[in-house]
Image (tube, coloured by chain):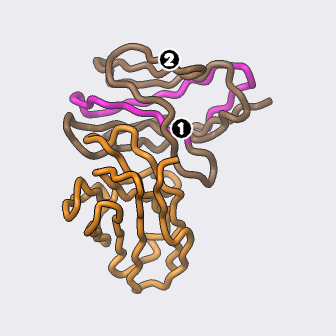
Amino acid sequence: QKEVEQNSGPLSVPEGAIASLNCTYSDRVSQSFFWYRQYSGKSPELIMSIYSNGDKEDGRFTAQLNKASQYVSLLIRDSQPSDSATYLCAVVPKGGSEKLVFGKGTKLTVNP
Amino acid sequence: DAGITQSPRHKVTETGTPVTLRCHQTENHRYMYWYRQDPGHGLRLIHYSYGVKDTDKGEVSDGYSVSRSKTEDFLLTLESATSSQTSVYFCAISDNRGATEAFFGQGTRLTVV
C-alpha cells in the first residue's frame, strides 16, 4: 500500500458548490498533514496544515483529520473557477521524520 | 515568496551524459529536498538534506546523487542520464524538522533524448 493515497479524479464541481477532496495514509504514527495546491505548470504551494484530530478552517478551506481512520480531507466552500488546480495531500510518515510524502494529487475543475 | 531559485529552468540533454541541477535558497533554511514529478506518480522524493554535508535517500534515489557544501545550495546530479529521468524536478526548503511548511522552487523541466 502506498503511503499516501488520493482519488486521482478528475473532480468537477459547479461554481459555488462544495468540493471535497480525500486522502488516506498508511502510517498510523503520522503526525503532520498538509494540503498543497498546484496550478498547471506551476510549483506546489501550501494552503493548509493540520496536526490534530478535528477540523481546521481557513477562509473557504476546511481541513479535516481523523487519525483513527487514517483519513484527511479538504473541503472548499463556495468553489470558484480560480480553485481549479491539482490538490496534493502530503504526510510526514513518522514522528520526527524529515521526509514529506505526497499523494498523486486530485485534479479539481470548477465550472462557471 | 520564499527565496528559492532553481537552475536551469529547462534542459535537454543526451542519454549517458551527466547533468547537475542547482537549488539555491536565501532563507537560511536547514532542510532541502529534491522531488521529481511525473504524470501518474505525483511528487516523489529523490534525496533530502538536513544540514551541510548531511543528506539521505528518498524513495527514488537510484541514478541520482546530491551534495550540499553550503547551507544555501543543494545540487542534484544525474550521473548518467537516461530517458526514464525525463521529468520535472522540484526543489523544496523547510525550516522545520518534518518538512512542515515546505516551500517549492519553480521547477526544472529536464528532457533526456
Colour applied to chain B: orange
Residue at mark 2 to residue at mark 1: CA–CA distance: 17 Å
Does the magenta stretch mainly form a helix, a strand or a loop? strand
Q: Circle 1 sits in a helix, a strand or a loop, which is it?
A: strand
Going 43% across and 70% down the picture, which residue do you hit?
B85
Counting other residues with Cα less than 10 Å from the Cα at mark 2, is it few (<14), some (14-19), or many (20 or more)? few
Q: Is residue A102 left or right of residue B14?
A: left
Quick check: is B68 in the magenta stretch? no
Residue B22 lies in quadrant: bottom left
Going 48% across and 61% down the picture, which residue do you hit?
B5
Three-letter code, disc 1: Tyr
Give the residue pinned by disc 2. Answer: A57
Three-letter code, disc 2: Glu
B62 above or below B51? below
Q: Is residue B43 left or right of residue A110?
A: left
Q: Chain of mark 1?
A: A
Q: Is residue A52 left or right of residue B108?
A: left
Q: Circle 2 sits in a helix, a strand or a loop, which is it?
A: strand
Counting other residues with Cα less than 10 Å from the Cα at mark 1, is it few (<14), some (14-19), or many (20 or more)? many
Disc 2 vs disc 1: which is toward the camera?
A: 2
Spot occupied by residue B3 in the image (x, y as percentages of width and height): 47, 54
Report the front residue among A34 and A11. A34
Q: Where are the magenta residues, as a range?
A: A10-37
Going 43% across and 19% down the picture, which residue do you hit?
A64
Q: Give the residue at the far right of this rendering.
A: A112
Q: Chain of mark 2?
A: A
Report the front residue among B68 and A96. B68
Give the residue pinned by disc 1. Answer: A87
Q: Are marks 2 and 1 in contact (CB under 8 Å)?
A: no
